[in-house]
Image (tube, rainbow, N blue to C red):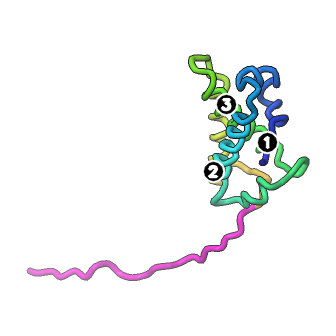
Amino acid sequence: MFITKPDLKVTILEDELNSIVRNDDTVITQAISAAESEMRGYLYDSYDVESIFSAEDEDRHPLLIQYCADIAVWHIVAATQAGQNLDDRKARYDRACRWLKMVRTDENYADLPRRESTQQTHIFSGSGQKRNNYY
């Protein structure tokens, strides 16, 4: 996986995380996997997601680590803290999604490897439908 449980420390305290998931690391693993899948979906069209998400240790993009952790913690907290005030977590999640959308459409620069296009461009030509005028 792109991030691990220790990477979540940038977003949530370890004690707080353990109390939320009750020391069940499967919840954390599922949330991290979901966050990575969500990020792949945003970046797939323009970026080489296999290269990005297979990077390890210091080769990982620091902002992607941050935002992946924000998204993963949102999934954890939203699923387990029913009725709690989630405004801060929701704001962080929304910010991560906005950034991913801007990167996807090249509104924001991200130092990520671009996807090599394997598709051919097709150009269709023709004319409009024949029109008969009757007077």
Q: Which residue is mark 1?
A: 65
Q: Which residue is mark 2?
A: 42
Side (left or right) of 56 relative to 108: right
Quarter of the image containing the C terminus? bottom left
Residue at x 80% of width, y 55% of height: 54
Q: Earlier in the sequence, mark 3 or mark 1?
A: 1
Q: Which residue is mark 3?
A: 76
Q: CA distance from mark 2 to mark 1?
A: 15 Å
Picture coordinates of residue 126 (x, y %)?
Answer: 39, 82
Q: Magenta span has 131?
A: yes
Instruction: Look at the numbered discs 2 and 1 and tell me whether their residues touch, using CB distance below 8 Å.
Output: no
| Residue count near mark 1 (Cα–Cα under 10 Å), binned few <14, some 14–19, many ≥20 | some
- Depicted 130 relative to depicted 95: above or below: below
Residue at x 28% of width, y 79% of height: 129
- Depicted 109 relative to depicted 135: above or below: above
Q: Which residues are magenta?
A: 114-135
Side (left or right) of 3 relative to 96: right
Q: Amino acid at mark 1?
A: Ile
Q: CA distance from mark 3 to mark 1?
A: 16 Å
